[in-house]
Amino acid sequence: MRYFFGFTKDQVGQEGLSPVFTLFKTEADLDDLSPPEVQEVGAGLYYCDYEPENNLVFVLDGGAGDLDMRTIFGRFTPEDDGLALVRKLFWMLGCRLVINNRTGVFTAYREDGVTPAASGTLRDDGINTERGNPTWP
């Protein structure tokens, strides 16, 4: 997931900074984590790429003393449930889906058509349809 941060002075984006995480920890246990590198986009906008497995907290220092806000305090969370659902639906609709008509077991495969993305059960007797909860690896 890509996270963006902005640094300004007198409401003007500041370029050429070297922001660095001075604190990067798990939220639950406050265990130290290795922070990602922060990259500059331009016009005072910076970003980092990180895929948190659990909630984490951070402090990001802009690296310059004369900014409107030199330090950013924040939180990263795993992918939003709604976004995850959209991704799962894409796998279901846009990728290979195999249903065993005899057992009702289905497997949805990722974009490569080989790696399983989800599995579950469907049963339909022409009157009633039973859907099991899919398992997402």
Image: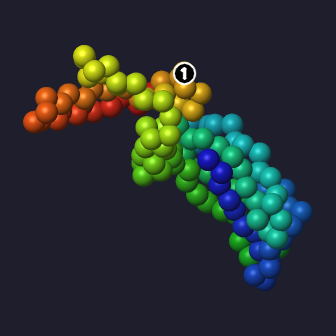
**Is the residue 41 above or below the residue 26 in the image?**
below
Query: Which residue is at the far left?
Result: 127
Q: Quadrant of the C terminus?
A: top left
Tell me if residue 30 can be seen: no
Return the residue at label 1: 114
User: How many circles with numbers are drawn on the protein?
Assistant: 1
Nearest the camera: 85 or 18?
Answer: 85
Tell me if residue 16 can be seen: yes
Query: Which residue is at the far bottom?
Result: 10
At x 70% / y 42%, what residue is drawn? 35
SS for callout 1: loop
**Is the residue 105 above or below the residue 11 in the image?**
above
Query: Which residue is at the far top?
Result: 102
At x 74% / y 76%, what residue is drawn? 68
Give the image location of residue 90, x and y in percent. 48, 43
Query: Which residue is at the far front?
Result: 126
Q: Residues within 10 Å of mark 1 (few under 14, many from 20)?
A: few
Specify the quadrant of the image occupied by residue 72: bottom right
| Kind of residue sitting beneath label 1 | Val
Give the image location of residue 95, x and y in percent. 50, 34
At x 43% / y 29%, what residue is drawn? 97
Give the image location of residue 119, x and y in percent. 37, 26
**Taking 44 as reference, is 77 left or right?**
left
**Is the residue 40 above or below the residue 131 in the image?**
below
Nearest the camera: 56 or 47?
Answer: 47
Nearest the camera: 86 or 82?
Answer: 86
Give the colouring mode of the picture.
rainbow
At x 72% / y 67%, what residue is drawn? 6
